[in-house]
Image: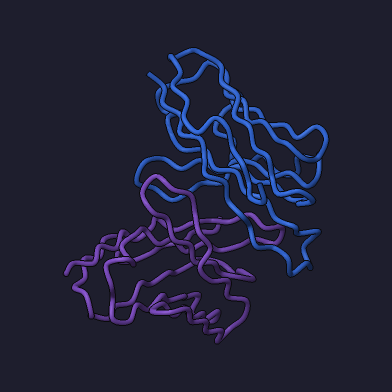
């Protein structure tokens, strides 16, 4: 059974600081997703990582994938308040079923 | 609209009542998924349709849960004799994916239906 674990589960950051969220998955997966969820809202797709060594960046967020280590990271650079949300990673099985991590609640303070 | 639409947005049901949750996927999307998201948790897979065929229902928590997609478009998730533990947000997602080799597998999520069983 595929398991996906994120850490930390709670992250309180000061504006301007950098931090990384880690996502470990237990079995071989052909792609890894990162989503953002604001309170009471649905899931917004941030990144899709398709292969080993893939790195994608959008604004202050950068995601990477190491399939050998079964590890993905979401790096936050110079955090701003607007980044406060819950972030999920999800691993995909062959037909598109997603297994999600527990989520990381990010709060950015002034 | 162009996105995945779910209705109702909110549903309060008395314990023992039956409920039906509707999902309108993006037009032309082959794959449709239902997920259950309990408070403070990540979404958990319930069931998967490819067109009208339900190919995986391994995530349905009990035989009180039933899903259908009779014409390969709109889907309905039905919960019979609701219990308090059924309280959650039910998310629907669709993707263009035509099979295991397809690259078009990005799933687009609806806003969800928040079900509260009292």
Residue B98: percent from left, percent from top: 81, 58
Q: Which chain is purple?
A: A
Of A67 and A17, the residue lying toward us: A17
Which residue is rendered at x = 56% and y = 21% of the image?
A: B19
Left or right position of B45 against B53: left
Name above or below for residue B50 compared with residue A5. Answer: above
Check the image and report above or below for B5 versus A70: above
Total labels drawn: 0
Decide if residue B98 is on the left or right side of residue B20.
Answer: right
What chain is colored blue? B
Give B103 or B83, whichever is nearer the viewer: B103
Question: Residue at image x 44%, y 58%?
Answer: A101
The structure residue drawn at horizontal position 40% and vertical position 62%, both measured from the top left corner, is A87
Q: Give the quarter of the image for residue A51.
A: bottom right
Which percent across, then down, holds residue A3? 49, 59
The quarter of the rendered structure image containing the C terminus of chain B is: top left
Whole-percent x, y for residue A31 in the image = 61, 70
B20 on left or right of A88 = right
Q: How is the image coloured?
A: by chain
Residue at the outermost front position: B1
Q: Quadrant of residue B104?
A: bottom right
Q: Residue A45: x and y, percent?
A: 53, 63
Question: In the depicted view, which residue is nearer to us: B60 or B30?
Answer: B30
In this image, B87 relative to A45: left or right? left
In the orientation shown, which residue stands out farthest toward the bottom?
A: A53
């Amino acid at each position: 059974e595929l398991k996906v674990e994120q850490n930390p589960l709670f992250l309180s950051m000061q504006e301007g600081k950098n931090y990384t969220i880690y996502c470990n998955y237990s079995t071989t997966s052909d792609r890894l997703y990162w989503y953002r969820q604001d309170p009471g809202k649905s899931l917004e797709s941030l990144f899709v990582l398709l292969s080993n060594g893939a790195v994608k960046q959008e604004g202050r967020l950068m995601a990477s994938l190491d399939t050998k280590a079964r590890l993905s990271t979401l790096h936050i650079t110079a955090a701003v308040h607007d980044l406060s949300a819950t972030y999920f990673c999800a691993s995909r099985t062959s037909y598109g079923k997603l297994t999600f991590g527990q989520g990381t609640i990010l709060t950015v303070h002034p | 609209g162009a996105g995945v639409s779910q209705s109702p947005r909110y549903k309060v049901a008395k314990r023992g009542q039956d409920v039906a949750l509707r999902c309108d996927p993006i037009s032309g999307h082959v794959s449709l998924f239902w997920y259950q998201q309990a408070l403070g948790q990540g979404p958990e897979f319930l069931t998967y349709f490819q067109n009208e065929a339900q190919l995986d229902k391994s995530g349905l928590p009990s035989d009180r849960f039933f899903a259908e997609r009779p014409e390969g478009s709109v889907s309905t998730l039905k919960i019979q004799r609701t219990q308090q533990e059924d309280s959650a947000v039910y998310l629907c997602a669709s993707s263009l994916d035509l099979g295991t080799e397809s690259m078009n597998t990005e799933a687009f999520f609806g806003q969800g239906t928040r079900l509260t069983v009292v």
